[in-house]
């Protein structure tokens, strides 16, 4: 139980009356009678609130949340009071959100129930713990409020962004992936896997005409080819300290995990096999490439618990273990980051070794905040100096792309927020050009 705002307002008024009563005696008696009436009303208000257990509340949310996305939480509040009441609902959300405004006030009619909905956006994977639901009820008098502790504590696991994966899945079914920025890549050349022979229609490439089949059918027939299938694609994720940099509350590792999950879905829709590799100071997780029905769930579970470390990434260990475990030539999509050209030169020999045995695509990040800073005009000498340093870092990123290209290594320089779309477009482009 707690005292309401009206109680304090009336109490202040009574104190003023008694204070004035020291000058004008009748007001002191009025104040005493008002104090007696207040006590009587509090007893009546308390009896109205406590004569029945009138409130029930419970929380409804998914058993797992999607990292980096808005996740809905519903609170159902039901009143059994035979008269209207005012309720304040406070949900004990996980402390990691550091929110103090998850409380809602509303008025419930007699025997009415309502559903409250709000959203939470986690930026870290792991287990988040909800507490109880605190409901404070006031009658029409508003002098007292009764506290109800409802619901049960609940743990929710925060997984990589599976909501993003569902959006891609729905748009892929409706063939609307272009809404997310996925480009329709024009096929260049011919693919090697023959699919069928069909009748020629206007617009077909005349170079695909099958003259023998045309002679037998006495009409033009063309060969139809399809993308090569069952190619192996591995998402190789660096978990070293370079991936701890944060952008909009999420680390580069989280962005890489979300992008690899979406890319895995697209790869399997293209009937290719997808696998997973993570590494830091040593070789860590390895999931063989496959396109079995349970592969996506297995990748999701493996990505759920991945964390960055403060150590230096060991690319030599990656080369040794990949040589042992991946025999077939595959596309390796390496998610990492380079602070400058010197950090690239330290790892360039290992990247060349990986590219000789497989097709390597190095995905690294440009600093979006740094680009925004450069776009702002400098105002003084120190500002010009800072701009020169910032432009030097941006130039080194472009120099890294040029250096990798000189050594025959494909690269993708992108911002964290555009990572998923850009890496999918790059995969589709490389596949259409038979570069895998």
Image (spheres, grey):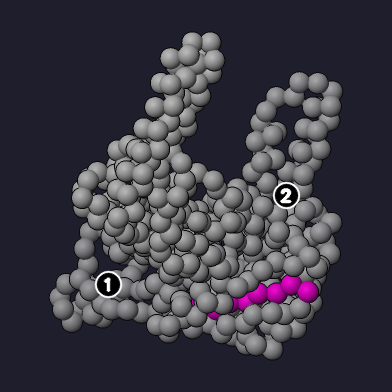
Q: Is residue 53 above or below residue 359?
A: above
Write the residue at 46% across / 81% down.
295
Q: Is residue 277 magenta?
A: yes
Mark 1–mark 2 distance (CA, rounded to whole Å) = 47 Å
Q: Residue at the spot x=29%, y=48% of the render?
A: 48
Residue 368 visible in rendering: yes
Local crowd size for mark 2, using a 10 Å CA cut-off: few (<14), some (14–19), many (≥20)? many
Quadrant containing the C terminus is: bottom right
From the viewer's perspective, tell me whether residue 205 is left or right of residue 131: left
Q: Mark 1 Cα within 10 Å, few/some/many (few <14, many 20+)?
A: many
Magenta-drawn stretch contains 113 = no
Residue corresponding to mark 2 = 397
Determine the secondary structure under disc 1: strand
Between 415 and 1, the one nearer to me in the picture: 1
SS type, badge 2? helix
| Residue depicted at x 77% and y 44% | 393
**Left or right: 330 in relation to 152:** right
In percent of width and height, residue 282 lies at 76, 78
Where residue 142 appears, x then y in whole percent? 36, 38
Residue nearest the observer in this picture, 162 or 338? 162
In the image, residue 100 sits, relative to residue 168, either above or below, namely above
User: From the viewer's perspective, is the residue at label 1 or at label 2 nearer?
Assistant: 2
- Segment tinted magenta in the rendering: 272-281
Q: Residue at x 79, y 52 (%)?
A: 340
Q: Provide residue 318's location: percent of width, then percent of height.
A: 73, 78
Judge whether 125 appears above or below 383 on screen.
below
Residue pointed to by mark 1: 222
Q: Position of residue 108 (x, y in %)?
A: 27, 45
């Amino acid at each position: 139980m707690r005292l309401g705002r009206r109680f304090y307002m009336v109490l202040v008024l009574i104190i003023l009356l008694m204070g004035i009563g020291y000058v004008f005696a009748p007001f002191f008696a009025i104040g005493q009678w008002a104090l007696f009436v207040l006590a009587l009303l509090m007893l009546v208000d308390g009896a109205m609130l406590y004569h029945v257990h009138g409130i029930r509340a419970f929380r409804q949310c998914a058993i797992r949340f999607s990292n980096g996305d808005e996740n809905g939480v519903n609170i159902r509040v039901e009143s059994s009071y035979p008269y209207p009441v005012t309720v304040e609902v406070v949900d004990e959300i996980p402390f990691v959100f550091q929110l103090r405004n998850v409380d809602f006030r509303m008025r419930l009619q007699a025997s009415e129930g309502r559903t409250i909905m709000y959203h939470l956006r986690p930026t870290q994977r792991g287990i988040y713990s909800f507490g109880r639901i605190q409901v404070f009820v006031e009658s029409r008098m508003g002098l007292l409020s009764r506290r109800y502790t409802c619901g049960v504590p609940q743990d929710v696991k925060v997984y990589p962004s599976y909501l993003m994966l569902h959006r891609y899945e729905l748009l892929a079914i409706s063939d609307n992936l272009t809404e997310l920025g996925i480009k329709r890549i024009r096929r260049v050349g011919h693919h090697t896997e023959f699919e069928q022979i069909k009748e020629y229609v206007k617009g077909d490439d005349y170079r695909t005409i099958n003259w023998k089949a045309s002679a037998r059918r006495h009409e033009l027939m063309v060969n139809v080819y399809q993308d090569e299938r069952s190619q192996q694609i591995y998402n190789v994720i660096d978990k070293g300290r370079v991936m701890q940099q944060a952008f909009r509350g999420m680390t580069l590792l989280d962005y890489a995990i979300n992008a690899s999950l979406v890319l895995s879905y697209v790869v399997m829709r293209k009937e290719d096999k997808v696998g997973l590799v993570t590494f830091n100071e040593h070789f860590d997780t390895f999931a063989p490439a496959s396109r079995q029905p349970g592969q996506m769930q297995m990748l999701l579970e493996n990505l759920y618990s991945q964390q960055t470390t403060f150590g230096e990434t060991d690319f030599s260990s990656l080369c040794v273990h990949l040589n042992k475990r991946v025999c077939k030539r595959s596309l390796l999509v390496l998610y990492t980051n380079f602070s400058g050209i010197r950090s690239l030169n330290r790892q360039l020999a290992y990247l060349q070794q990986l590219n000789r045995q497989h097709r390597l695509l190095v995905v690294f990040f440009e600093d979006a905040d740094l680009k925004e800073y450069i776009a702002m005009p400098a105002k003084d000498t120190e500002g010009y100096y800072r701009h020169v340093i910032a432009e030097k870092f941006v130039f080194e990123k472009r120099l890294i792309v040029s250096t990798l290209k000189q050594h025959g290594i494909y690269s993708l320089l992108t911002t964290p927020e555009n990572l998923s779309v850009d890496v999918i477009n790059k995969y589709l482009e490389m596949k259409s050009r038979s570069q895998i």
